[in-house]
Amino acid sequence: FSSQLLPVVVDMLFIQRGTGKGAAAGMAAGLLATFLFGPLFQMLVNALGDAAPAFLISTLDTVNSITGSLKVHGSVWGLVVNVPVFVLVSLVTKSPDEEKKAQYREAFHSS
């Protein structure tokens, strides 16, 4: 799950064009995808057994059909979702003022 911080860190260190809302949306979407495509979701559905709601079972079937031939770790799937969501939300939300960005940079450089 911690790999979902990677896009935010790269943006903060090198690009500096993302927004807080973009970062939050990207991380939330990435964490959800990591959960769905990782082993925890499979274990949850298996633990529920016959009591599992139909939408969970159909979601698991969809995830299994997507990942059937691609053996990729769940955190990679999370990054595949995180990065585009982070970029798109950052593009449509307002970036902080340049004065505010300068204050942040000054605070980080002085410490």
Image (cartoon, grey):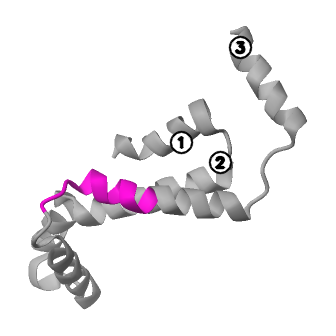
**In whole angstroms, how far apart are the C-alphas of marks 2 and 1?**
8 Å
CB under 8 Å between discs 1 and 3: no
Residue at 17%, 73% in the rendered image = 45
What amino acid type should be assigned to the residue bearing mark 3? Answer: His
Q: Which residue is mark 2?
A: 18
Provide the residue span drawn in magenta: 71-82
Residue at 17%, 70% in the rendered image = 67
Q: Which mark is residue 8?
A: 1
Q: Position of residue 86 (x, y in %)?
A: 56, 56
Q: Position of residue 65 (x, y in %)?
A: 16, 80
Work out which residue is located at the far bottom of the displayed protein and give it: 54
- Which circle's residue, 2 or 3, is located before the other in the chain? 2
Where disc 1 sits, the SS reads helix
Where disc 3 sits, the SS reads helix
CB under 8 Å between discs 2 and 3: no
**In whole angstroms, how far apart are the C-alphas of marks 1 and 3?**
19 Å
Mark 2 nearby-residue class (10 Å; few <14, some 14–19, many ≥20): many
- Which circle's residue, 2 or 1, is located before the other in the chain? 1
Q: Which residue is mark 3?
A: 109
CB under 8 Å between discs 2 and 1: yes
Asked if the stretch drawn in magenta spans residue 73, the answer is yes
**In whole angstroms, how far apart are the C-alphas of marks 2 and 3?**
20 Å
Work out which residue is located at the far right of the displayed protein and give it: 99
Work out which residue is located at the far front of the displayed protein and give it: 15
Dominant secondary-structure state across the stretch colored magenta? helix
Residue at 48%, 55% in the rendered image = 83
- Which circle's residue, 1 or 3, is located before the other in the chain? 1
